[in-house]
Each structure stands twice: as structure tokens, then as C-alpha cells.
Image (cartoon, rainbow, N blue to C red):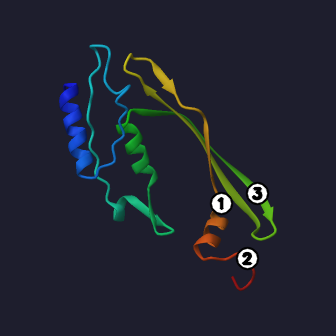
Amino acid sequence: MSNENALVLIKDAQKKGALIYFDQTNGFPKEELYRTEITTMTIDKDKDCFEISKKFMPKREVVDRIGEAAGIVFIKGETKIITVDDPSCGKHNIYIGISQGQVRMPDGTWRKSSVEEYEFDPTLRAMMDYKVTELTAQT
């Protein structure tokens, strides 16, 4: 696909309200062995997303499909569980996901992302969802 055709497809999708994951600076190949590839995904918020605090969050498999379509290869992934004793929440677990990805650049080299940590506290999330400031027998 030529660069001009790719830009036309991208601009048409933007006009329709699509989310575009494309870096125009690095998205077009500089080597003849590589070409621009457009991938279109449709996500059904009822089947492919969780509704959390009235917001839609894509499920893990959807995030993986988005990453794959964007050319991201995940090279590191681990999960840690830490136990905390909070005066307002009591003793509970917090989950920490650690990940790193890499993407192929137009010249054929790999660019690695920084290692990122994502923290999820299900107890705190539940307290926020139900507007509770402290866990008691009643709450």
C-alpha cells in the first residue's frame, strides 16, 4: 500500500470517529523490504469490555489484539502480589503487573519501551465504586 493510500484510509477512519494508533513520523518504511499495513479493528463494548465505574475498559484479549495490530511484541510480563494493612481498608492484597514491549522501527531495528508497573487494588476500587470511606461490618 502506498503512503498516500494509507493516509487517505487513516483520515477517513478519523472522520468516522475511530481511534487511530499511528505514528506518522516512524510509521512509513524507509527500507524497501517493509511496507505500511493498515489494520482495522471493531470492538463491541458489550462483549469486549468491562464496565468499571461507568467507564468501559477493554478486556485483556482485546488489549492484546490492539498491541498485535500496532506491531507491539510484549517481551516482559510478571505479576506481584503485595499484602498491605491499611487502617481504613484492613489487611488486603494489591496486584502489581509489570510489562515491557518492543516495536519494530521503519529501518528494521527494535525499539523497547520502558518497563512499566500497573497497580490494582480491588478493595480500594470496590470502596470507591460503593462510595465507602472505611470498611466496617455494615459496609
Residue kind at label 3, given as amino acid type: Thr
Q: Residue at x 32, y 16 (%)?
A: 30
Which residue is identified by label 3?
83
* Above or below: residue 29 compared with residue 97: above
* Above or below: residue 37 compared with residue 110: below
Q: CA distance from mark 2 to mark 3?
A: 17 Å
Secondary structure type for disc 3 = strand
Left-right relation of 87 to 50:
right
Which residue is identified by label 2?
135
Q: Residue at x 26, y 31 (%)?
A: 37
Secondary structure type for disc 1 = loop
Give percent across and percent down for residue 91: 78, 65
Mark 2 closeness class: few <14, some 14–19, many ≥20 residues within 10 Å: some
Mark 3 closeness class: few <14, some 14–19, many ≥20 residues within 10 Å: few
Residue kind at label 1, given as amino acid type: Asp
Which residue is identified by label 1?
121
Of the residues under marks 2 and 3, which one precedes in the sequence?
Answer: 3
Report which quarter residue 72 is drawn in. Answer: top left
Left-right relation of 88 to 2:
right
Residue kind at label 2, given as amino acid type: Leu
Which of labels 3 and 1 is toward the front?
Answer: 1
Of the residues under marks 1 and 2, which one precedes in the sequence?
Answer: 1
